[in-house]
Image: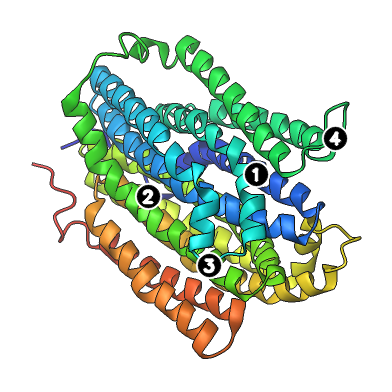
């Protein structure tokens, strides 16, 4: 057992904010890259906005597998740091990067067939064609994006969160400028519209990946771990450990992201205006979600470090600290979205659009639903992050799959199509799935001792 005195709950809240603050900024900056694409494509028209929603969801549903591998790297490295085991840090980091790079190459195949996949799932061919014109270029950004995920996980585990923020802000600025130039033909560039957004995404991610590689290689904090020395050498035991945690985490995140992607597909069956409104509401909800997501990453580090130090009290307090912070933020964001939904919606729509009134009318009730499930979404991701710090991933994966698909998707389909509530019904289903997941995951963390998740000898 740890001989160091346990920290108080307030100490853990403070330390979580110190680590989580820059991570929140980094997650928001990363999300703003997609938001920028959505806002600018919305200036092209309702069809482009709807097609962009389909393309982003298709891309994201594969990106989250990378997030799962990155999420597995964090507690493994944090635990090694808690044990003062630099070799363990290096092994987990290297094999995590191996897994991410290989996965990014494999995923190029399904992204190449975006048009065929969307049409097979019942989407309008004209929207699928627009989505494919974006994806022809954007799909290659998945490779540097996965490398960035791995390097950010390394920086997060060693609590170098400010560097994560700065590199993400750099990618956001590059993407913003290139979008402005390539989508609309500004700054002397050709007007490429949808493909221009895809090209901008590739360039921004590639430059950001190169910047992060150089930073990690030269930083005084990470240099002692020699992360890139003989990186070509295999370490199958460490790779198995990363995949053992990463695959269930990836599937867990996939269950949630897949729920939202399926929601986009179902709303696409209803109509183009409804899909555009859904895309706006989803982007806004995703922005607010970045805060509890970043806090959950901080929780994985704090809980994993406490596990490495064999401190039972710190394990509990580190987990509860992020639940308190996530719940407080959810309350504030829910009130804001409920009171002024149109303020946020108008940011995504060209005021000259002929469909502006229809899109706003369809988006307002969806944003009210987003406000309603803020607490559930924040708590479930915070609890999931704390459980990952305990290396508990398989049962949370089962909980997530049942909650999001067994409850959320079934409820969404029934209410939307059998009861005729359309897009609002789909979002009611989303809220129900998140509610079940939040209760089940929080209960599991609260019962960690009885369930044998904290087993210190």
Would you identify the image quadrant in which residue 342 lies?
Answer: bottom right
Q: Earlier in the sequence, mark 3 or mark 2?
A: 3
Q: The N terminus appears in which quarter of the rendering?
A: top left
Label 2, label 1: how far apart the Cα atoms are: 36 Å
Q: Nearer the viewer, residue 16 or 416?
A: 416
Cα gap from disc 4 to disc 2, whole angstroms:
43 Å
If you read the primary sequence from the N terminus, does the residue marked by circle 4 or circle 3 appear first?
Answer: 3
Marks 2 & 1, CB-CB < 8 Å contact: no
Name the residue that disc number 4 marks: 185
Q: Residue at x 8, y 41 (%)?
A: 457
Residue at image point 37% right, 69% down: 405
Foreground label between 3 and 2: 3
**What element does badge 4 sit on?**
loop
Alpha-carbon neighbours of circle 4 within 10 Å: few (<14), some, or many (≥20)?
Answer: some
- The Cα–Cα distance between marks 4 and 1, rounded to whole angstroms, is 17 Å
Residue 44 vertical placement versus 402 (above, below): above
Q: Which residue is mark 1?
A: 133
- Of residues 19 and 145, which is closer to you in this image? 145
Total numbered labels? 4
User: Which badge, 2 or 1, is on the more N-terminal residue?
Assistant: 1
- Mark 4 to mark 3 CA distance (whole Å): 33 Å
SS assignment at label 2? helix
The residue identified by callout 2 is 385
Q: Real-space Cα distance between discs 3 and 2? A: 35 Å
The CA span between labels 1 and 3 is: 18 Å
- Which residue is tagged 3? 122
């Amino acid at each position: 057992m740890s001989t160091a005195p346990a920290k108080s709950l307030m100490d853990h809240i403070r330390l979580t904010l110190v680590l989580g603050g820059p991570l929140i900024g980094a997650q928001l900056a990363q999300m703003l890259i997609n938001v920028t694409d959505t806002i600018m494509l919305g200036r092209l028209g309702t069809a482009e906005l709807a097609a962009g929603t389909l393309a982003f969801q298709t891309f994201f549903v594969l990106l989250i597998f990378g997030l799962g591998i990155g999420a597995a790297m964090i507690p493994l490295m944090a635990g090694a740091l808690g044990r003062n085991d630099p070799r363990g840090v290096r092994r987990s980091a290297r094999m995590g990067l191996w897994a991410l790079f290989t996965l990014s190459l494999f995923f190029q195949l399904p992204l190449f067939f975006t048009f065929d996949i969307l049409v097979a799932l019942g989407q309008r061919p004209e929207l699928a064609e627009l989505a494919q014109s974006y994806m022809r270029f954007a799909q290659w950004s998945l490779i540097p994006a996965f490398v960035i995920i791995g390097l950010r996980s390394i920086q997060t585990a060693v609590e170098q969160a400010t560097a994560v923020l700065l590199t993400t802000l750099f990618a956001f600025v590059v993407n913003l400028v290139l979008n402005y130039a390539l989508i609309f033909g500004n700054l002397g560039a050709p007007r490429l519209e949808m493909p221009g957004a895809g090209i901008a995404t590739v360039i921004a991610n590639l430059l950001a990946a190169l910047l992060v590689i150089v930073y990690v290689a030269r930083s005084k904090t990470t240099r002692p771990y020699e992360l890139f020395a003989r990186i070509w050498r295999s370490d199958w035991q460490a790779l198995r450990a990363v995949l053992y945690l990463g695959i269930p985490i990836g599937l867990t995140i996939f269950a949630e992201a897949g729920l939202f992607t399926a929601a986009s597909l179902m709303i696409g069956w209803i109509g183009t205006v409804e899909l555009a409104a859904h895309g706006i509401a989803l982007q806004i909800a995703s922005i607010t979600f970045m805060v509890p997501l970043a806090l959950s990453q901080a929780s994985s580090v704090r809980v994993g470090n406490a596990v490495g130090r064999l401190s039972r009290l710190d394990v509990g307090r580190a987990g509860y600290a992020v639940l308190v912070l996530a719940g407080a933020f959810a309350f504030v964001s829910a009130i804001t979205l409920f009171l002024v939904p149109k303020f946020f919606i108008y940011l995504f729509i060209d005021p000259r659009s002929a469909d502006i009134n229809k899109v706003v009318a369809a988006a307002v009730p969806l944003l009210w639903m987003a406000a309603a499930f803020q607490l559930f979404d924040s708590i479930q991701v915070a609890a999931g992050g704390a459980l990952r710090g305990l290396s508990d991933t398989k049962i949370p994966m089962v909980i997530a799959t049942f909650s999001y698909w067994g409850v959320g998707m079934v409820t969404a389909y029934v209410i939307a199509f059998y009861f005729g509530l359309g897009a609002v019904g789909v979002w009611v289903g989303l809220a129900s799935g998140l509610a079940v997941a939040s209760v089940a995951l929080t209960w599991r963390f609260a019962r960690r001792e009885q369930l044998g998740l904290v087993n210190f000898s």
